[in-house]
Amino acid sequence: MDLDQSERAMHLLVIGGSPDHLGGVEAFCERSGIALGRLGGYKITYLASGNAFMNFSRLPKLLAGLRHLWSYRQKQVDCVWVQYASLPDLIYAAIAKLAGFHVVVTPHLGSNWRSQESRLLRLISKTLLRFADRIALISPTQELEIALPRSVPRSPIRNFLPSGILESPVVDTSTRPRELQLVHSGRLSEGKGTFLFVEVCALLKKAGTPFFARITGAADEQTMEQLHGAIAHHALEDQIAVMGRVTEEQLFELLRGSDVLVHLSRIDSYPLIVLESLANSVFPVCMELAGARDMTETYDGAIVTVADAAHETAELLTTHPVSDLRRRAANVSKAVRTDYSWDNCARALDEALRADMR
C-alpha cells in the first residue's frame, strides 16, 4: 500500500507486524501511517515482518520478507522504519543497513520480553540495534528496560490512540450508574491479570461494595473455561459479564460507561489501554511496571505491588468513593487527548524520522 504525498515526498518503508496476528504493533503501523499522511510529505510502503510467535515453521516467511526488503535497494527509499517487537525484527534492521538504507528502529517491548530476560538475547539485541541510525522510543521508561547501545542516538515519539477516542465527546461521568463499574480488557490470561481481576471482584463482594464488572478480550478455550470456573467458584455470575472479543467501537463505548480499569498485567511494557481509559475518564489501577507507573504519574491512577495486587486493589476501591475516582479521571481526560492528538504524535514521529537526514 502506498500513500503518495508529492513528488518530493520522503519514501518511508515501514517494516513490522503480522497480518495473521493483529494487535498493538499492527494498529500502531496503521495509525502512524494515516497520521503522517495527514501531515504530508510522505510516500509510505508497508512490509509485514510476520515475526509474531516466531518458530521454525515461520522461518520461510522471515526469509521471504528479508528477500523482499533486499529488493528495495533498487528503488528510491529514503528511510526504513523497523518495528522491533521480537528479536527477528532486528534482522530486518541489519539487512536494511547493509543494503545502504537509513534505518530507524522503534521498540515495542519492555524488560519482561524474552529478548530482554536472557543475558545472551539481550546482548544479541543490543548488537543488532547498533545497525540503526536512530532509535525512536515510544516511552521514556524504555531506556530503563531495554538494552540499548549508547552509540545510537534516541528520539522520543508517542503511541497513537484510536481516533475514535480522541474525536469523541469528553465523557459526562454523572450519567454512569451509582454502583462501581469495573472493566478488564485485553488478551485474557494469567499474565495479563485476568484471574487477579476475578479475585478483586471476590474481595469487593466480601466487603459488601456494590459493583458490576465486565471482561473483554479473546482467550483460548482452556483459559476461558478456567475463567468461568473462577467466576462460578466465587458465585460472581451476576456481577461479572464475560463479553469475549469486542470491536474497537464497542470497547470505546464500554470504557465510557466504566469507572475503573483494573489492569494487573505483569507483561505489558507500555499498556495503551491505560491511556485509552484515561482519555475516557476511567481511573486505572495497574501493577508495578515502569510504563504503567510513568502513565499514572504523568496523569493519574494507582499502582499496586506485584506481591499483593488483588488485596491492594480491593482496599483502594473500598476506601475511595466512586465520585472521587470519577472526578480524578475526568480531570486529566482532556490533557491525555491533547498530548496524544495525532497531530502532536505525527510531528514527533516526523522529527525522529528526519533527524539525521537534514
Image (cartoon, rainbow, N blue to C red):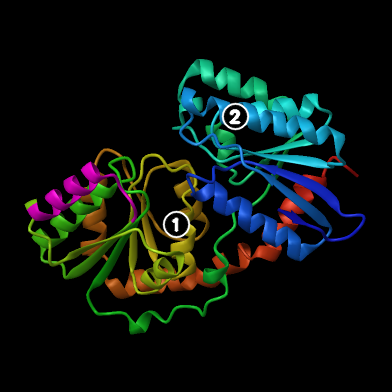
Q: Are marks 1 and 2 in contact (CB under 8 Å)?
A: no
Q: Is residue 238 above or below residue 65?
A: below
Quarter where residue 302 is shown: bottom left
Quarter occupied by residue 9: bottom right
Q: Residue 113 got which mark? A: none
Q: Which residue is mark 1?
A: 274
Residue 150, visible in the rendered structure: no
Foreground of the two, 223 or 297 = 223
Q: Is residue 160 magenta?
A: no
Residue extent of the magenta highlight: 217-232
Question: Is 200 rendered above or below residue 249?
Answer: above
Q: Looking at the magenta stretch, what is its main secondary structure? A: helix
Query: Does the stretch in magenta take in 218?
Result: yes
Position of residue 170 in the picture relative to residue 301 (left or right) = right
The three-letter amino acid code for the residue at tag 2 is Leu
Q: How many other residues sit within 10 Å of disc 2, few (<14), some (14-19) or many (≥20)?
A: many
Judge by depth and name the residue closer to the eye, 323 or 85.
85
Closer to viewer: mark 1 or mark 2: 2
Disc marking residue 62: 2
Tell me: residue 47, above or below residue 210: above
- Measuring 55% from the left and 61% from the top, which residue is drawn there? 161
- Percent from the top left, x then y, of residue 260? 33, 64
Q: Position of residue 12 (x, y in %)?
A: 78, 47
Q: Earlier in the sequence, mark 1 or mark 2?
A: 2
Measuring from the top left, give residue 36's x and y in whole percent: 73, 58
Q: Amino acid at mark 1?
A: Val
Residue sticking out furthest to the bottom: 175
Q: Is residue 166 left or right of residue 34?
A: left
How packed is label 1: few (under 14 Cα within 10 Å), some, or many (20 or more)?
Answer: many
Q: Residue at (38%, 64%) from the top-left corner?
A: 283
